[in-house]
Image: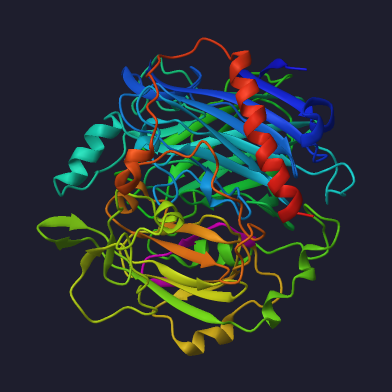
Amino acid sequence: MLGRWRSSAGWVAVAVVWAAALVGPCSAGDPFAYFDFDVSYITASPLGVPQQVIAISKQFPGPVMNVTTNWNVVVNVLNSLDEPLLLTWDGIQHRKNCWQDGVLGTNCPIPQGWNWTYQFQVKDQIGSFFYFPSLGLQRAAGGYGGITVNNREVIAVPFGTPDGDITLFIGDWYIKGHKDLRKALDEGKDLGMPDGVLMNGKGPYRYNATLVPDGIDYETINVEPGKTYRFRVHNVGISTSLNFRIQNHNLLLAETEGTYTVQQNYTNLDIHLGQSYSFLVTMDQNASSDYYIVASARFVNESLWTRVTGVAILHYSNSKGKASGPLPDPPNDFYDKTFSMNQARSIRTNVSAGAARPNPQGSFRYGSINVTQVYVLRNMPPVTINGKRRTALNGISYSPPATPLRLADEFDKQGVYTLDFPTRPLDRPPRLGTSVINGTYKGFMEIIFQNNDTTVQTYHMDGYAFFVVGMDYGEWTEDSRGTYNKWDGVSRCTTQVFPGAWTAVLVSLDSAGFWNVRVENLDTWYLGQEVYLRVVNPEDNSNKTELPMPDNVLYCGLLEDKQKQQAPHGSQGSSSFTTYVGAMLLTCMMIFASIVIFP
C-alpha cells in the first residue's frame, strides 16, 4: 500500500491509503497522505552566487503536498539543520488542533538532529496554501513548499477542469544567509534592498544583459497552445510586495486561500507577502516568441530597485523564438496607491459557488452577525525598547516565552503569559511582553489592522479564515464601518494593510486553541509584531471542542524535565517502514478523536 511517485518538484515519499483498509479499527473513512521531510542545507546559486539554502528532502523549493478535502495528513520531519526548527502550514486551519500549527506559541522547536511527526486533517478546506519554517528568518533561506487541497469529486468546481496545474513561488531574496540577516536585525539595522526575486527557487531570465549576469538558471513553464492552465502563485518572500503579470496574457482570478472568487480578468495583480492566488490562464497567443512571466517589487523607487525583479519564461510548444525586448510594464502608481487598494477591493467571494461543502459560500451571512469583541491593532515604525530595535502591536512587542502558551495552559503553569492585551492602542511607552488576546469561544470578532508604518504590512491569522470587509487610507474610526462590504467580502487568511491605512476583518471564533496573529513581513515579525489569540470553551472538559495533546508532544521551558531524549541522527536517505508504522499508530489516536469532534 505504500507508494512513491515522481512529481514535478521531485521525489516525494508519500502513501495515500484508505483508512478502512489500512488501520482496521481506526477507520474514519477519509484517506491518509504520508510525507517524509528531511529539512537540510544544500548549496545553490539562484542569483549566480553559491549560498546555503534550506531544502526539503534535497529539493528547493520543497515538494507540493497534493491532498483533498478532509484527508488526514501525516508529515514526519527530520531536522538536519544546525538549529531548532518548526514548520507551519500557512492557511491550513487545523480545526480544534492548534497542537500542529508549528509556531512557538503552540509547539516546542524540533531540536537539531531530531525528528517529529505532524498529523492533522484538512477539514472542510479547499484551495492553495504553502508551508515554511517559522523560526528565526529561516524562510529567508527557503524551506517552503506548496499545499494544494483539491475538491472532493462530489463538489462542483465553478470552472472547467484546467489542462494543467502549475505552482509558482515568487519572493524577494538576499544573497546573505538567514543568520546574517538575523544578525543585522539584532544589531538594529534594516535588511536593505533585496538582491533579486526568485521564481520557483531560480533567478531571472536574462532579459537585460546589463542587469542580469550570464549563466543564471531560470524557470521555464512549458505549455500547449489553446489550453488553459491553473497557476497557483504564492509570495513566499521576506519583505517585498510583488506585482505579478504574464506578458500578453490575461489572469482570470479564480481562487485565493481557500475561497472561490468572482472570476475577473487582470493584466497584473499585486501579491503581498504570504498571499496565495489561483489564476486560470489560457494560451491564446500566436507564439511568435516565448513570453515573460514577471514579478517585480512594488511601492519602491523602481529606477533604484530594477534588480528586484523576477523573470521566468512561458514557452509554447510551437514557440518560434526566445523572449526578447522590454518587460511588460508594471502599474505606474508609485506616488498614487489607490490603484493597488482598488484592485484589492475588487477581489470578492463567489457567493453562489460551493467549496469544501456543497452549500454556497455565501450561505454564511457574516454581515448580519452581531460583533461581540472589537480589537484595533496598530503597528508603528520600529521603536527602541530596552536599548533594542523592536516592532510592536498596540505598544507591546511580543517576547516568546520558553514554554509554549498552549503547553503552559495544559499543565497549569502560571506566569507564562498574561490575558491583558489592550483592545485599542494605549498612550504609553512601548514595552516587551507576552500579552495574549482573550477571545470568546463562539464569539464574532472584528479586528482592525491600523498600519502607521511606511511600508505595506501583511497580516496573517492561523487557525481561521477571516472576511476582509473594508480598507481605506487614514485612521480607522467608528464611522468607517459604514464602508464595510457585508455581503461578498473575500474570506482568506492573509490580508495587506497599506502604509497609513487600515484593513478591517471579521472572524467567527469557533475553533478552540491558541492562534497566532502576525505580520508575514519576516523582519517586522522577527522584531515582535505578533500576538496570540486564546480561544477556550469554558464548559468543555471532554475534548469535544479541542483535540487532546498528542502523545508525541515535545516539552521545553518549564516542562523540559518531561522530555525524553532522542538520539540525534543525520539526514535519512529514504523513508523507512518504521516511520510509517509510527505515523499510523499516532494517526489512529487522531482519528478516534476526530470521530467525536467532527461527526
The location of residue 540, given as percent across then percent down, is: 61, 66
Where the N terminus falls, by quadrant? top right
Residue at point 72%, 44% (across, down): 592
**Residue 352 placement: quadrant:** bottom right
Of the pair 151 and 124, the residue shown nearer to us:
124
Q: In the visual, does 218 lie left or right of 509?
A: left
The location of residue 322, given as percent across then percent down, is: 58, 20
Q: In the visual, does 255 lie left or right of 136?
A: right
Residue at point 37%, 19% (across, down): 568
Give the prevailing secondary structure in the magenta stretch.
strand
Where the C terminus falls, by quadrant? bottom right
Q: Is residue 503 among what the camera can see? A: no
Q: Is residue 57 above or below residue 262?
A: above
Q: Please check the rendered image and state whether residue 137 is part of the magenta-colored stretch, yes or no.
A: no
Of the pair 23 and 134, the residue shown nearer to us:
23
Q: Is residue 164 above or below residue 413?
A: above
The location of residue 38, given as percent across then percent down, is: 48, 21
**Residue 228 placement: quadrant:** top right
Q: Which residues are magenta?
A: 491-502
Q: Please check the rendered image and state whether residue 499 is part of the magenta-colored stretch, yes or no.
A: yes
**Residue 224 placement: quadrant:** top right
